[in-house]
Image: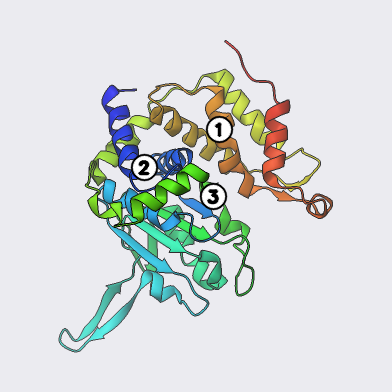
Amino acid sequence: MEIQFSRKILTVMDHIRKVVVGKTKVIELVLTALLAGGHVLLEDVPGVGKTLMAKALAKSLNLEFRRIQFTPDLLPMDVLGVNIYSQKAGEFVFSPGPIMTNILLADEINRATPRTQSSLLEAMEERQFTVDGVTRRLKEPFLVLATQNPIEMEGTFPLPEAQLDRFLMRVKLGYPNLEEERSILHRFGAQSPLEDIKPVLSAEDILEMREQVKSVNVDESVENYMLAVVRETRNHPAVRLGASPRASLLLYKCAKAYAALKGRDYVIPDDVKHLAGPVLSHRLILNYESLLKDYRPEDVIAEILEKTPVPVE
């Protein structure tokens, strides 16, 4: 991979790390999703920096940023937009919703009703949306960063499998350690460093880098390893429904993007291991016995990675 590609990525990461403390792996995953053309579900408790990360990413890349606070009374038109009759023009004029942006933060997405949640499906998959029979294209690049609180259940509507499958990754930020939390106090005690972030890339740069990612090589042995991991999710005794062929394709694209992010023009097995959890875990449906034992999809992925033979040179 070109040195210039790696330099651009490192510059963006450095800018985001000025604001987001101690989440290098999470930042890498979000940038990987952006390069792979996918969306990210950030699942964690409030106050760990999900919104801050989205804003820092948008400012670093000079991309338009919008935020929607999902609530039970939110309607699809509040997301997509609505046709309003203009007396001056004598016709209906389309007023676009916040979905017409580059980076959309769907905050607490599981608080909206299934109907409103489903309004994002077409946009996330096909980069377009339809209002009153008219289909409109979205801006490129387009990235949905959705957040949900896994603890608070009252007043929430769990994301259906079709919605979850639209997310390339599910990522958890986690709490900072002691020194990271101390650093947060010092950085944000006076003013927010978010105000000092300057754009280092543009939308055109991201689209060009996406094209470069396509040239990353995946050896047949690594490809077979990737397929073996996905196929094992369908045979695991704890799983009722395993990962689909779409999951294989997304893991393939993600591995190429992550390799490029790391400055390589080839994928290695460790890339697959690193991405298997975030890309596959939210696509697994466990059987009832496993759920009663408090078994998690992440545990299934860890077992599969441990048992599946890794290709060697």
Residue 291 vs residue 212, the one in the foreground? 291
Distance (Cα) linking label 3 and label 2? 16 Å
Distance (Cα) linking label 2 and label 1? 21 Å
What quarter of the picture does the N terminus occupy?
top left
Looking at this view, name the residue that lies furthest to the left. Answer: 88
Residue 255 vs residue 21, the one in the foreground? 21
Looking at this view, name the residue that lies furthest to the top. Answer: 313
Residue at the location (32% across, 33% down)?
10
Circle 3 SS class = loop
Q: Residues within 10 Å of mark 2 (few under 14, many from 20)?
A: some
Please provide percent x and percent y for residue 239. 76, 45
**Image: 76 above or below 232:** below
Given the image, on which type of amino acid does mark 3 rest? Answer: Tyr
Circle 1 SS class = helix
Provide the residue designation for mark 2: 17
**Image: 284 above or below 115:** above
* In the displayed structure image, the side of residue 278 where residue 185 appears, left or right: left
Provide the residue designation for mark 1: 274
Given the image, on which type of amino acid does mark 2 rest? Answer: Arg
Circle 2 SS class = helix
Please provide percent x and percent y for residue 242. 69, 44
Please provide percent x and percent y for residue 41. 51, 53
Residue 192 vs residue 13, the one in the foreground? 192
What quarter of the picture does the C terminus occupy?
top right
Provide the residue designation for mark 3: 175
Residue at the location (27% across, 57% down)?
64
* In the displayed structure image, the side of residue 79 where residue 209 appears, left or right: left
